[in-house]
Amino acid sequence: MDERHLYLVRLIRDLELSPAPVISLLAGDHDDCEQATGVLEMLARSGSMEARQVLRSYIREGEHWVDVLESVAGCWPVEWSDDLADVARSRLTGDEPLLWRCEPVGALAASAAERLAERQTSARQCCGGTERQPAAGAAR
């Protein structure tokens, strides 16, 4: 853990400062984004919904989204970010598909697949275990 991150988190949290200056660093270069991500991750883990939502939004729209996704996937509880697997898949280009083979992002993909399977099971159970059959004479 970077001591600077912890120091900044404590300042923001204990003095009830706005995280806006840290959030603005996400728009900077790779190093700025990395610093901001570390601080915002810690703020989120300490209870800041704002920090959590900012990072989730950044993964959806930000320039360095892959780095942020890898970082939050490694330190957040899975339930905070498992739905981002679908968002990430939609943003993949070039060499990024290799991302799904690496931890911790691979765990997000697995969690998303489990969530989908649970939904499908629930839907089948909800419908009495029967699937709708096409009407007689309906085109397939």
Image (tube, rainbow, N blue to C red):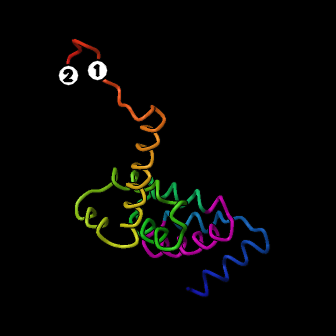
Q: Is residue 67 above or below residue 57?
A: below
State whether the magenta stretch is mostly helix, strand or loop.
helix
Residue drawn at 68 percent across, 71 percent down:
46
User: Mark 1 Cα within 10 Å, few/some/many (few <14, many 20+)?
Assistant: few
Residue sitting farthest toward the right: 15
Q: Residue at label 2?
A: 140
Q: Is residue 134 left or right of residue 17?
A: left
Q: Is residue 140 above or below residue 31?
A: above
As drawn, the label of residue 100 is none
- What residue span does the magenta drawing correspond to? 28-51
Q: Which quarter of the picture shows residue 136? A: top left
Q: Is residue 45 above or below residue 55?
A: below
Q: Residue at label 1?
A: 134
The x, y position of residue 61, in whole percent, is 44, 53
Q: Is residue 35 magenta?
A: yes
Q: Which quarter of the picture shows residue 1? A: bottom right
